[in-house]
Structures are given as C-alpha cells and as structure tokens.
Image (spheres, helix red, strand yellow):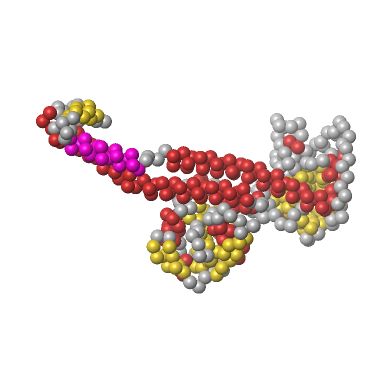
C-alpha cells in the first residue's frame, strides 16, 4: 500500500470516535466497526496489505487465539483518543481507552503495512507488546515482536515518497475491495481450472484406454475355440507345454500359446475357457464403464464451465470446500458434496449418484431437480423444518450449473424427500413441491 494513500486514509479515519467491534473474518483480514455502523477491513497479507470497504464480507470462522481474545478485550467498545500515521511510515496507530470500574486503560493498536513485516500489534501505554498477529523473533529481524518486549521503532525510509492524491477516500476504499476481489477471483479461477483440467485429462485418458467391445468378443470367441481344439486333440498334447500346435476342424495346423505351463491338458483347456469367459464378461459390462466415465467427463466439463462463469470468490469457495481427508471421511466418486451456510448439499454426478442420493436421503432432507427436464439430483441434508431461502437458491443454482452449459432462466422444483417416489432408477414422481427460478444470464 502506498504511503501517500495511507496518509489520506489516516486523515479519513480521524473522524471516528469509537471502535464498536473488532475481529478477524479470515486468517489475515481484520474487520473494524467504527461508530456502530461504519465497517472497514484491514487486509494484513504480507504481499498484499491494504484497507478496504465493502457491503459485507463473510466471516470464515470464529478465531479464539490469544491475539483475538485480547483484541476483543482491549478494543471492543473502545474510545478512540488519537489516530496518527506513526513515524511518518506506513504504520497507522490508534490510541484507545476502555473505561473500567477501576481505571482508564490505555492501549495502542498499531497496524503496520510494511511489506515483509506487515503486522497488527497490540501495545500497552508503555509501548510493551501485549500480543501480535505475527510474532517476530530476533533471528528474523532486528526488531523483535514478542509479548513482554518493548517495541522498537521502524527506521526512517531513506527516500521521500511520491504523492498520489485521492479524490474520494471512501470510493477509493470500495475500489480497493473490488480490485482485490477481481485479482483473487482471477487467481483462484486459474488455479482451480488447472486442477480440474488435470482431472478431466485423466478421465479422458482412461476412456481412451478402454478395450474395444468387438475386439473383446472376438478374443472371447477365439479363446473358446482354442480350448475346444485342445480338448479335441488331447491325445496329441503333452503336459507342461506353453505353446502347442494342433489340427483344427478343417485339418489345418493351429498354434496355440498359453500364458503359462500346465500339468495337464484339461487344465490348459480350462485356462482358455476361463479367459474366454472373462473377456466375454468384460465385453458385456464395457458399456457400463464407458457410460460411467462419459458421465464423469461431462460432469467435469460442467464443473470447469461453472468455475469459468463464477462472478465472485464466494462461489469458488463454495465449489471447493475445505479438504476433509484428515477426518478420514469416505468419499463417493459419483456424488459431489458442497457446503452452503453450514448445510451439506450433495449433487449426483451421474445416474448412479442420483440413485444413491435418493436411496440414502432422509425424509426431512430437501430434494431439488430441474422442472420437466433431465438434470442432476440435489439433496440438502437437514432435520430442520425451514431451510433458509438463500441455501435453497444456492442449491438450485448448483443443480442448474451442473446440468446446463447454456445460459438462461431455468425453473428448479424442490420438496422434502418424503414427497418423492422412486419409479425406476433415478426416475421419480413428486408432489407438494415449490419452484425457484435460476437466472444464469
């Protein structure tokens, strides 16, 4: 963040009289509510520190580290005594007080936008470190940031920074958020699409490596024929041969190679009959494997398309929930699982996944499906009577995203699972349903 911008933002912050609330909304973003309803966000990522404003920013989790506990204790409902750009550097310092029953407690909140050592440090009135977002030891920097140690000043920069005037500071703060989201969205899209493309190529390679059905049937017939020839020529064959030459039914010589030596002629024939049966079964079941892989390939293409069309970071985060492998949760490769506002939303990747969802869902779970057309089945797992409309809308959007490439207005029906009657496979009848419109244009 430019020093010139920080000067002007600091002047803007000086109008505030109170910190109403302060807490982390993500690992590196601190939300500060000034004078009850004026919200600003401090992004403390080392390579991308900035201050921004936005309509709302979802809190990823509740943080309870010592830093967060002290942050709330010292600055929630704190009076602002003074705000300054400390030492003429990229450091914003808030001097605050909390009036208690015994005495007034002075605390400094020092927000440092200093590149490698970007930090938020809580100091007492003697400038001794009480806590910090990042602790810095003496081996990393001459300026140690450690609880109980007095904080040294940052050395003055050896150059004079250029001035970059801001016409409207508040508009600038909103633009900073917009820019950050655009940069983050672009980076996330690139990263996730690369990951999905690797999975897609792997599925396509598997599909291309599948055996040919006609070749398998021909192979089965050939091995069956060879087995019968061995039985017809038993008196001419000696045990422990790996390759034999026999007469076929027309009197022509036929060379038969076995995959290993057998102690009897009967075992040779049985081996060929077994291989023939296996090839025949493989040929008869090949269409199931092909259909399964094709449905997974189609699902992956829809997944990539959905990521490409995502308009915000929240959508990407919804599509890629945090890894649950540490909990050793068994995954199903026919079902995609998402989390929307704490609700588990499961989506069938193919017919097998749709059938499993229908069979395993509970009576109160919410079932969703596109109106009067084939689509992915979606289940919202819940035991509540009323699921938030926002969750249903998000689940309906997922249903459309993983069914349709074309943009448009689509209708999605939803109803409790108990109202859905399975007819055949994933074909169902349902009643007492409601409908939500999804506009993907």
Q: Total of numbered circles in the picture?
A: 0
Q: Position of residue 374 (x, y in %)?
A: 49, 60
- Residue range of the region highlighted in magenta in the rendering: 213-230
Residue at 48% in and 55% down: 348
Left or right: residue 95 versus residue 282 is right
Residue at 54% in and 58% down: 399
Of residue 77 and residue 227, the one placed in the foreground of this image is 227
Q: Is residue 218 visible?
A: yes
Quadrant of the snapshot with the N terminus: top right
Q: Is residue 263 visible?
A: no
- Locate residue 435: give its quadrant: bottom right
Q: Please determine whether, in this image, residue 247 is positioned above or below residue 332.
A: above
**The magenta stretch spans residue 67:** no
Quadrant of the snapshot with the C terminus: bottom right
Please identify the residue farthest to the front as the structure is shown. Answer: 250
Q: Position of residue 217 (x, y in %)?
A: 30, 42
Residue at 42% in and 58% down: 355
- Locate residue 142: give its quadrant: top right
Q: Please determine whether, in this image, residue 345 is positioned above or below residue 141.
A: below
Q: Position of residue 405 (x, y in %)?
A: 57, 53
Of residue 441 and residue 31, the one placed in the foreground of this image is 441
Q: Please determine whether, in this image, residue 191 is positioned above or below residue 173.
A: above
């Amino acid at each position: 963040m430019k020093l010139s911008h920080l000067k002007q933002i600091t002047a803007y912050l000086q109008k505030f009289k109170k910190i109403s609330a302060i807490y982390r909304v993500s690992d590196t973003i601190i939300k500060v509510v000034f004078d009850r309803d004026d919200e600003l966000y401090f992004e403390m990522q080392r390579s991308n520190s900035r201050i921004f404003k936005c309509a709302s920013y979802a809190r990823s989790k509740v943080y309870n580290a010592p830093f967060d506990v002290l942050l709330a204790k010292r600055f929630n409902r704190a009076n602002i005594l003074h705000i300054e750009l400390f030492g003429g550097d990229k450091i914003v310092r808030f001097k605050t007080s909390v009036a208690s029953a015994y005495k007034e407690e002075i605390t400094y909140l020092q927000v440092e936008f200093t590149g490698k050592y970007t930090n938020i440090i809580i100091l007492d009135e003697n400038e001794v470190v009480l806590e910090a977002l990042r602790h810095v030891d003496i081996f990393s920097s001459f300026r140690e940031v450690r609880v109980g140690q007095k904080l040294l000043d940052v050395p003055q920069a050896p150059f004079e920074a250029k001035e970059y005037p801001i016409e409207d500071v508040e508009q600038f703060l909103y633009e900073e958020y917009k820019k950050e989201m655009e940069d983050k969205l672009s980076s996330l899209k690139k990263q996730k699409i690369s990951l999905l493309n690797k999975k897609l190529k792997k599925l396509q390679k598997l599909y291309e490596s599948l055996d040919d059905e006609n070749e398998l049937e021909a192979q089965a017939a050939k091995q069956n024929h060879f087995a019968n020839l061995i039985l017809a020529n038993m008196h001419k064959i000696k045990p422990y041969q790996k390759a034999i030459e026999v007469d076929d039914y027309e009197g022509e010589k036929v060379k038969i190679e076995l995959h290993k030596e057998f102690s009897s002629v009967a075992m040779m024939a049985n081996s060929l009959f077994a291989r023939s049966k296996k090839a025949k079964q493989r040929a008869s079941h090949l269409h199931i494997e092909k259909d399964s892989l094709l449905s997974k390939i189609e699902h992956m293409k829809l997944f990539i398309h959905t990521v490409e069309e995502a308009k915000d970071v929240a959508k990407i985060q919804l599509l890629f929930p945090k890894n649950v492998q540490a909990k050793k949760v068994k995954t199903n490769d026919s079902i995609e699982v998402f989390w929307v506002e704490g609700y588990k939303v499961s989506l069938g990747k193919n017919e097998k996944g749709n059938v499993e969802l229908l069979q395993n869902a509970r009576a109160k779970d919410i079932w969703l499906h596109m109106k009067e057309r084939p689509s992915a089945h979606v289940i919202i797992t819940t035991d509540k009577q009323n699921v938030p409309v926002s969750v249903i809308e998000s689940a309906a959007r997922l249903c459309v995203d993983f069914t349709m490439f074309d943009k448009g207005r689509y209708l999605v029906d939803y109803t409790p699972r108990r109202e859905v009657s399975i007819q055949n496979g994933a074909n169902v009848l349902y009643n007492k349903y409601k409908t939500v419109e999804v506009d993907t244009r």
